């Protein structure tokens, strides 16, 4: 199993499988299904869309599969995209949309980094913060605790939304590997799930909804509006499922003294 956050194959919509909950994600198949979803979402924010990506996300079977998990607002946006977009003809404009939102810091750039959405002013209100500050330090600490490393080819900062989603995919893959190993790796898979809970509670779910709001305001096509809503729904769903743990899991819930923030 690779240690690098981005050192596994790119996930596509075709990799995403139905997600069900049995005994609080206690099977390796469920962990792998969640890893596939996180990799798929990570890819959406880390690189411009290619034609196959657009075709797959607009596939009727794929959208129908998502209907069982996600809200009407997210699916309605993607269904409207499917009804109006030609993957080949409209690909240049969709790629430009990606560049405008996530790559080029001009008028519609959403600054997709946790640091920017998590800073606090002296009076406790939220403000736009500097990059590579205390949030980046906290995120790097969790990456190290999980044994993950930034891929040498990745040019993004550790708090980029795509990298944080890739980290969740990495944790799910590590959990799946431990579950496949059986009882001798029980401590490992509980440990990876515990870090997932920390990372969702203290990081992604604490800032992504604000990024999603900015994407809704700045995007000009339904693609990234829909993907942002899909991401927001999935993060909330995943956190709720992970939070429905056994009493032993709740007793082992992370505390501030753990040093994992």
Image (cartoon, grey):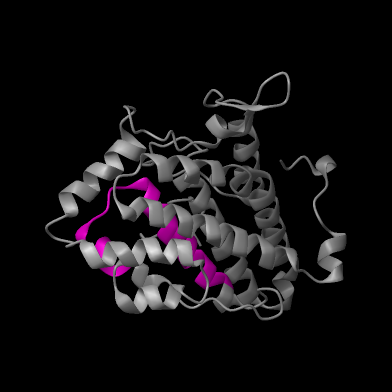
Q: Give x and y (percent) for residue 60.
A: 31, 76
User: In this rendering, would 192 be left or right of 155?
Assistant: right
Residue drawn at x 58%, y 33% is 136
Q: Is residue 245 visible?
A: yes
Q: Nearer the viewer, residue 76 or 37?
A: 76
User: Residue 29 falls in which quadrant of the image?
Assistant: bottom right
Q: Is residue 45 magenta?
A: yes
Q: In this figure, what is the number of numbered marks?
A: 0
Taken as a whole, is the magenta stretch helix, strand or loop?
Answer: helix
Image vertical order of residue 134 relative to residue 84, above or below: above
Determine whether 56 is above or below 210 in the image: below
Q: Position of residue 108 (x, y in %)?
A: 34, 33
Q: In the displayed structure, would residue 59 be above or below residue 206?
A: below
Q: Is residue 146 magenta?
A: no
Residue 7 in view (yes/no): no
Q: Position of residue 166 (x, y in %)?
A: 48, 53
Span highlighted in magenta in the image = 31-57
Task: Say which residue appears at 56% left-offset and 55% top-offset.
Answer: 168
Q: Is residue 83 above or below residue 21?
A: above
Taking 215 as reference, is 244 left or right?
right
């Amino acid at each position: 199993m690779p240690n690098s956050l981005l050192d596994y194959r790119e996930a596509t919509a075709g990799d995403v499988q139905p997600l069900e909950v049995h005994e609080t994600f206690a099977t390796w198949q469920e962990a792998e299904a969640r890893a596939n979803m996180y990799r798929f979402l990570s890819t959406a924010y880390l690189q411009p869309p290619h034609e196959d990506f657009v075709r797959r996300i607009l596939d009727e079977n794929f959208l129908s599969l998502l209907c069982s998990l996600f809200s009407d607002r997210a699916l309605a946006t993607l269904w409207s995209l499917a009804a109006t977009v030609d993957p080949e003809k409209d690909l240049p404009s969709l790629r430009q949309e990606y560049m405008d939102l996530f790559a080029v810091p001009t008028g519609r750039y959403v600054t997709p980094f946790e640091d920017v959405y998590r800073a606090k002013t002296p009076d406790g209100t939220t403000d736009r913060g500097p990059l590579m500050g205390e949030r980046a330090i906290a995120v790097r600490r969790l990456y190290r605790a999980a044994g993950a490393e930034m891929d040498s080819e990745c040019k993004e900062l550790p708090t980029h939304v795509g990298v944080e989603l890739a980290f969740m995919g990495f944790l799910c893959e590590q959990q799946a590997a431990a579950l496949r190993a059986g009882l001798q790796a029980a401590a490992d898979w509980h440990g990876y799930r515990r870090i997932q809970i920390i990372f969702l509670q203290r990081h992604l779910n604490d800032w992504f909804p604000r990024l999603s709001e900015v994407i809704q305001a700045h995007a000009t096509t339904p693609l990234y509006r829909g993907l942002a809503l899909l991401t927001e729904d999935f993060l909330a769903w995943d956190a709720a499922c992970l939070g429905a743990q056994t009493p032993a899991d709740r007793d082992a819930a992370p505390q501030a003294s753990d040093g994992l923030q």
